[in-house]
Amino acid sequence: MALQAKYFEERERALLGERYAEYYAAPSEEAARGVTVNRLRCTPEEFVRLAGLALRPSPFCAEGFAVEEPDFKPGRHPYHHGGAFYSQEPSASAPAALLDVHPGMKVLDMCAAPGGKSSQLAAALQGQGLLVSNEYNAGRAEILRSNLERMGVSNAVVLNSDTNALAKAFPAFFDRILVDAPCSGEGMFRKEPQALARHNEGLVRQCAAIGREILDNAAALLAPGGVLVYSTCTFAPEEDEGQIGEFLARHPEFTLVDTGAAFGSPGEENRYGEHPFDVSLVRRIWPFQGGEGHFMAKLVKAAEGESARPFKPEKPAKPCKEWLEFAGKYFPALADRPLLKAGELLLLPPEMPLPPHKLRVMRCGVAAGTVQKNRFVPAHHLFTAFGHTCTNQERLTLDDERTAAWLRGEEIEARTAENGWCCVLVDGFSLGAGKVSGGKVKNHYPKALRNLK
């Protein structure tokens, strides 16, 4: 163990005793690479059949797979561009799967960047209900927004706010809340060397305090009868069992319940500090169990109590004739959806409106496009979210040479699309918008997303 982690090693040897060497013996020297399939796009079975990758099912999530190909470059794969999967270390997909989300619910991901867990929650909602994905760091919030756009999420509100502001804006509002708390990252030592380099006892205490504040705000945000899943990617008692013990002592309205997970191991009694509880109800993933290290707890709020009052809906933008003309031709199912105006951008909002509080909104629903010189110019997000319904499509396949050319930003031959705007798809997964003229599809794939190297 490196000198920077001396505190970690001494603590864990004291807590685990003879088990230390076994529990921290990872199956391989490198972290496992994995993908989590996006059920908004396809089923795991369909993905396995189409992707042509060497995949091993993950024990942590039904949609998760370990990729057993050393040369696999997830960000360059066409299905990644099409939002069919999220590149994610296998055990990282576990917490979201424990939340038991169903279509129509109001769901909050409090610490959501870069977006893997939010995309799982969105897939469980299947476009019905509301997903609020929040990230305090502005740069990471932009990455979150981009990833949810790529995954075709249509009913999310992406926020860049602190959790105190959220608690004031959405009291007792959400049916489900995921708190994947900022932590000292002890489970990431093998995957991220910088996590090992910066680790110290002070960081553990600091992260425990941040997690405590976030959990208290989550308690205020959760509706009566709602479910909260708390998770970390660390082994530190102060951030794991100790955190849950303290939370239960502060919030008697919450009950700890079994996660229902068959993977990993129960919690550890010598880690809960001054507030004992049944540690068999929480779950740990140790390195020797095939994950990088995770802790998970599932809590239910008492059904009694005051629920949130409904918010007044935002006033829709005035009817936009340019949008109506465009949607009537290419997206007829969307033509009657109300629009919101954010600067020059027109948005298709999710079902649930935002509360009348000042929050930094990165995106509310789907960016439909803008009106320029009396013409409607569609946004990339419109095609990632609804491209499969577009009436004009250029259909590519994984082994079509035009697919790689398209992702490089090149113009390609039109074979299935007619003149005008079209959605370019690879095996049914949207790669965004093109415009057909003279037998060619002009490339409108955003330059920042292209495979340029």
Image (cartoon, rainbow, N blue to C red):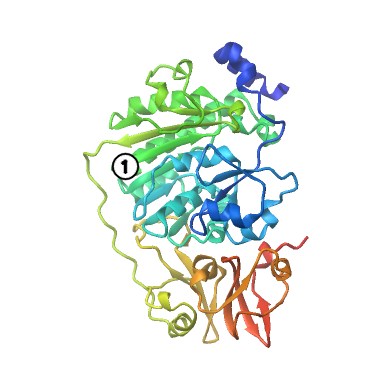
Please name whichever residue, 223 or 280, is drawn nearer the observer in this view of the structure.
Answer: 280
Label 1 amino acid?
Gly
Please name whichever residue, 50 or 212, is drawn nearer the observer in this view of the structure.
Answer: 50
Q: Residue furthest right?
A: 453
Question: Helix, strand, or loop for circle 1?
Answer: strand
Q: Is residue 400 left or right of residue 124?
A: right
Residue 139 in sight: no
- Residue annotated with mark 1: 226
Residue 203 placement: quadrant: top right
Residue at point 63%, 55% (across, down): 51
Residue 233 position, x and y percent, is 55, 33
Residue 451 position, x and y percent, is 72, 62
Q: Is residue 452 left or right of residue 143?
A: right
Q: Residue furthest front?
A: 49
Residue 225 position, x and y percent, is 28, 41
Q: Is residue 97 left or right of residue 305?
A: right
